[in-house]
Image: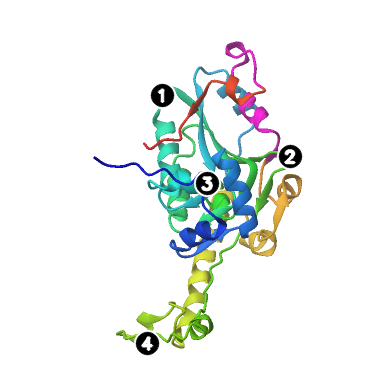
Amino acid sequence: MNATVSPPATGPTMQERLARLSTHGLVACLPPQYIQATVQRAMEAEKITPGQERAVARKDGAIAVVSMRGVIVPREDRYSQYFGEIGAENIADRVRAAVADARVKAIVLDIDSPGGSVNGLTEANAAIRALRGKKPIVAHADWNMASAAYWIGCAADEIVASPSAQVGSVGVITWFADVQEQMKMLGMKVTPYSKPDDKADGWGMWENTEKFDARMKQEIADAYEQFVSDIAACRSIDRAKVLADWAGYYVAKRAKLYGMVDKVRPMSETFAAYTNAANSGATSARNKLAVTKLKGKN
């Protein structure tokens, strides 16, 4: 008989969240304090014109809401709900399923994410971008759309932000923890044996080879280059603009000035734009709309 172990009621600590996120390599996310706040809430190009919105609203059908609330990882696993994670691969799968679903007339990416792992982001971006033109896909920032979340969200037909939402933080970061001094204090010395020598780089318990620093900087540069290229392609924007200002993290109105978002309005208005008023008596609350939630595994 298998015993079921329930996770602690308090949830994972910040150190546990960062340790798990770091297992995925490079990250595109905000500083730790933003991660904790956003995850807590989670646990609880082509532009779309008003005329196109009205045309879709007149159609019968539901609005598929794809949740992007939490820290982004490459793929969800059995622990993702506990850690407040969402998978880049899973997000793309859910958008693909919504586009294929005859009952769905429009898709809204409901985004409140500080970012996350770089792995899987360019693939998710490409998968969603390939679905453009079939049904309206709207990325709505409500409240954080940072870094990795922007990398995925910019593949939508348009980006909308709630008035007090924040958008941006386009960039890539990683870190290296050198624990040699701590080990000396414990009276420990670890000697690595590897072939080639640089196979042992990055452990932090001994000196790295001369290749390590240059290799890490190149890895960061390559990931950032891909990030900027995907944004430029999705948003039809000059790369120089992205390089100049988009590392900043801006409130919606200023993000729109920089070309990071297309519209500023509450989430309720995004839903109302695609809702047939004749079929819905209320368009101000999410739970009163004909919304298809696509949060489970597909």
Determine which residue is flagged by label 1: 102
| Local secondary structure at mark 3 | loop
Image location (x, y in percent) of residue 153: 55, 46
Inspect the image, locate mark 4, and give the three-letter code of the amino acid beneath it.
Thr
x and y percentages locating residue 219 in the rendered image: 48, 71
The residue carrying pointer 1 sits among few (fewer than 14), some (14 to 19) or many (20 or more) residues within 10 Å by Cα, namely: few
- Look at mark 4 in the image and give the residue it sits on: 191
User: For residue 3, what is the image quadrant?
Assistant: top left
Q: Quadrant of the C terminus?
A: top left
150 in relation to 95, above or below: below
Crowding at mark 3 (Cα within 10 Å: few <14, some 14-19, many 20+): many
Specify the farthest residue to the left.
Answer: 1
User: Which of the two discs, 2 and 4, sits closer to the camera?
Assistant: 4
In primary-sequence order, the first of circles 2 and 4 is: 2
Residue 284 picture quarter = top right
Q: Earlier in the sequence, mark 1 or mark 2?
A: 1
Left/right of residue 46 with respect to residue 251 in the rendered view: left
Q: Nearer the viewer, mark 1 or mark 4?
A: 4
| Residue 282 among magenta residues | yes
Residue ID for mark 2:
163
Counting residues from the start of the chain, the first of labels 3 and 2 encountered is 3
Q: Are marks 1 and 4 in contact (CB under 8 Å)?
A: no
Q: Which residues are magenta?
A: 263-283
Q: Secondary structure at mark 2?
A: loop
Q: Amino acid at mark 1?
A: Ala
How far from the left and from the top, in percent, is residue 10? 54, 46
**CA separation, marks 3 and 1?**
22 Å
Which numbered disc flags the more N-terminal residue, 3 or 1? 1
Residue to which mark 3 is pinned: 155
